[in-house]
Image (tube, helix red, strand yellow):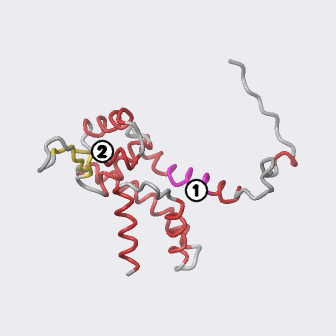
Amino acid sequence: MPDINFATPSQDAAAPRPAAGDGGNLRWDIIELLFFAYRDFVGDPDQELEAFGFGRAHHRVMHFVYRYPGLKVADLLDVLRITKQSLGRVLKQLLDEGYIVQKTGDNDRRQRLLYATPKGEALVQKLAGLQTTRITRALAEMAPADAETVKRFLRAMIDRDDPDKVLETIFATNQDSKE
């Protein structure tokens, strides 16, 4: 396969430009800010996870299992919107290394309920601490009321046509905190 070489862009070529035919109405500013914010938001935990041989999928699984003890495997698949095969590889490693335990349901023995172990809880707390530090730093540059605006914006970005059980819980919790 041949190498792909990019010439150093000239000043004009490096300037942001709208896509053809869009009339310049695309929100490149927000799109790029979201790309870079996401990169840095997950980058802090990525460095920590690397030491364990884990990646972002492990982080996401650990996060939701910790936050929603007894989460069913089927619900976790819905939350993450990944295949059973993708989850299986990650979940097996987390189970084998003692970060998560799996229990059968009390009423339905076919259910597989997931719980973080103390080891898993410690890892999630450490990763959430890194992310909280970044969030706190960003919010410190804003007026206190702006945090609610940020939360409203992020909630509005989520596709709610087919909310899963976790999102329903999050949205219900947010409604309860407003009342």
Q: Which residue has dot 2 on it? A: 74
Looking at the rendered structure, the secondary structure element under dot 1 is helix
How crowded pointer 2 is (Cα within 10 Å; few <14, some 14-19, many 20+) is rated as few
- Left or right: residue 163 versus residue 149 is left
Residue 99 occupies quadrant: top left
Front disc: 2 or 1: 2
Q: Are marks 2 and 1 in contact (CB under 8 Å)?
A: no
Where in the figure is residue 127, as x and y percent of width and height?
40, 54
Q: Earlier in the sequence, mark 2 or mark 1?
A: 1
**Residue 42 part of the magenta-drawn span:** yes
**Is 75 situated above or below 92?**
below
How crowded pointer 1 is (Cα within 10 Å; few <14, some 14-19, many 20+) is rated as few
- Left or right: residue 155 versus residue 71 is right
**Is 177 situated above or below 35?**
below
Q: Amino acid at mark 1?
A: Ala
- How many labels sit on residues? 2
Where in the figure is residue 130, as x and y percent of width and height?
45, 57
**Residue 10 part of the magenta-drawn span:** no
Where in the figure is residue 28, as x and y percent of width and height?
71, 55
Residue ranking furthest to the top: 1
**Residue 12 vs residue 151, the one in the foreground:** 151
Looking at the rendered structure, the secondary structure element under dot 2 is helix
Where in the figure is residue 86, as x and y percent of width and height?
39, 35
Q: Amino acid at mark 2?
A: Ala
Q: Residue at x 50, y 56 (%)?
A: 159
Rendered image: mark on residue 37: 1
- Left or right: residue 44 versus residue 4 is left
Magenta residues span 34-43
Q: Residue at x 66, y 54 (%)?
A: 32
